[in-house]
Amino acid sequence: MVLGTIGYMAPEQVQSQPVDARADIFALGVVMWEMLSGERPFRGDSAIDTMHAILREDPPEIAPELGLPSAMERILRRCLEKDPDARFQNAQDLAFQLENLGAESSGPSKSTKILPAIEEGELPWYRTPHKLFYPFPVRLPHKLRVCFWDRVQLSAAYALLAALVVVALLAVSGVITLGRLGHSELNEKYEPAAELTGILQSAAISRDGKHAAFAVNDGSGPIRLLYREGTDIRATMEVEKPPATDVLAIADTGTALLKSAEGSIFQMEMRQNASAMEIATKVLEADIASDGTKVALLRSSKDGYIIEFPAGRTCYTTKQRIRDIKISPKGDALAFFEQEAKGFLFHLKCWRANGTVESWTDKGPLSMRGGYFEGLLRGVAWNANGDGLYLATQGNLVGLLKKNGQQVLHRNAGNVRIYGATNDGLLLEVGAEVTANRGLVKGQDKEADLSWIGGTLEAVSGDGSQLLVSREDEIWVLPSEKSKGKKVGIGKVEAFSSDGKMVLYSDSDRVYSVPSQGGDLRTLATADELKAQGLLLTVTDGLPVRFVISEDGKWALMYSGQTVVRKRLDGSGGLEPVKLTFSDLQPGWRIFALTSTDGNQLAMQVREGSEGNRLVALDSASGKEFGRVDADQTERLLGWSSDNGFLTFATVDGNGVFQRVDLKGTRRTLRTLEPPMANASGRFRTIRASSDGTYYAYRYSVTGISQLVLGKGL
């Protein structure tokens, strides 16, 4: 449990690690800093932000006008070291340093010369403000009132500012024309890359632009693999009986890398009479050098992630998640994104042929937090020079990342994804999806647009008065009347209590519970504790653990696959496995959704492969089943009541339908939702509702026209 006063806790306290006297040294350093500067060294808008600052941020610079001796600042910063071993090891060491400082500053030395105070009018001309160089009545701080040349420099700054104002006025009036300020724009030059029918699954293009491959699903059968050689967009041919259809990359030689659903990698010559060879199995990602001579592979193991480059030779290992491995144009470097150890952000790294790994983690217009939220990444590719990478994000922009900076190339690009780069352009998929966020919450008499939440709606409280929202990695609780909400944490949302009082969220190491209106942050379970129960907090393959808070707000339930575990939300007790005995289900059954009134009565939706779909009610103490109903394939369990049965949502004739289903299988329609977009065929997604179905929210998506293009002018 995390105990301590927020703002004065040492990093090891924040992380629930063992503490000793060195934590008190850290707290004393905070107090001394506050006494000397008037502010705490680590601050945030909330308790979560303050704890994040203690773990990650360095203390700010102390204002020079305070005249703090440099020796004192060194003492303070040593007290505030993140690593306990780097601080003073006991109070006696700290006292000794302070006594020495006091002895040095107790009085002036014989060589110190104390100058009498001089009034402004008594200063010589070169230290007196001059009207010629001070056109505005501005007094510099005392330390800056030193010499004539300081005033010359300040006057030059005034002149430059005046020139900028004049230029801006002329630009607004149309007298002169300015280019775009702040970023360069991708020239609106798009060339069609291929004439395709159906939904694009994956694509790749060679560095010289002469070879391209596309995997397309036209709805008439299996995914088709198409290949194009040359620049004629109509000259595509279908590859007969490919060993796999997920296109990862293609070299200038026409050699492509294909991946199967099982993770097998095939190297295939794409011309007529194409031949294929399996080169690796159990692979997450792969890339091929532009000359076709080397392949990079990304694998996962129980110990972490492994990059092989070239294939068969391990060049980099880490316990953190890796994605988007890309070989540079010259084949002498490898770029990839790696997740930070104590958070969700991914940072760009570059492996060099000499074995060194560089981190490109500076903040910029594309990574305001110093990294990238995984859900926003939409593809990367090296530029032609090999000194930077193009990046597409869900924020509708394309940018260029370099070691020493970032540049936005194209804003408001629409829904865009990068599939590769040539020497003079990018292979982009543009278009893809149109969405609408709708719902009925407290204070409304009819369904309305919910785009004002500014993020992804994760849950609705039982009375419809509060909304739980994800904004990238920030977690917000917003009142339904659109007043200012409250940020409660940074991480991945897991669950929201029906009364709106408690939020569960996680990072890669643990699951936290926190009151939605502020209060103590508590660790509900660690990743190791969950793993011991067969539940995985973060996975790349398989099913991650999911969380539910019972309607009475007393239990947290965790489930994945065929496993259910519960724990009291107040933190007492340990993880309690729930016994499940479904003897008549197929061996591969899994829990698709779960809900509970009080932690004792559970309702589950159980899937058996792609066909069977069941609604089951059981007792958590004994595991005894007391009700089962067959469900439609589109039906989704949302809630449960021992009196009224299951609450479900289903799609019927294109409409969304909330239903009550009793234990006999009788269905009663509660509400019917019509598609919010006229003359559009789409899907109801991300259904969120109160336990009784009175309040709800959803996202409706329509597949738009997706176009594959070459964007040039970079």
Image (spheres, rainbow, N blue to C red):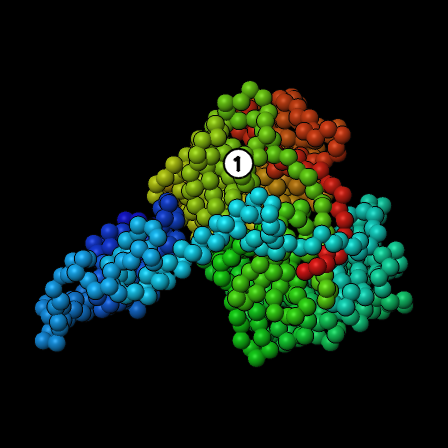
Is residue 439 shown above or below 538? above
Q: Please give the residue where the numbered disc 1 appears in the rendered image.
A: 453
Q: Closest to the observer: 463 or 117?
A: 117
Q: Position of residue 71 (x, y in %)?
A: 22, 69
Q: Residue at x 70, y 59 (%)?
A: 713
Q: Is residue 581 left or right of residue 417?
A: left
The residue furthest front is: 132
Q: Position of residue 185 (x, y in %)?
A: 64, 54
Question: Which of the 4 quarters of the picture holds residue 121?
Answer: bottom left
Q: Is residue 668 left or right of residue 104?
A: right
Q: Position of residue 181 (x, y in %)?
A: 56, 53
Q: Amino acid at mark 1?
A: Ile
Q: Residue at x 44, y 54 (%)?
A: 161
- Which quarter of the image is occupied by the C terminus? bottom right
Question: Which of the 4 quarters of the picture holds residue 228?
Answer: bottom right
Q: Position of residue 695 (x, y in %)?
A: 55, 26
Q: Is residue 580 left or right of residue 528?
A: right
Q: Residue at x 76, y 66 (%)?
A: 206
Question: Which of the 4 quarters of the picture holds residue 238?
Answer: bottom right
Label 1 secondary element: helix
Q: Residue at x 70, y 42 (%)?
A: 433
Evaluate whether residue 245 shows in this view: yes
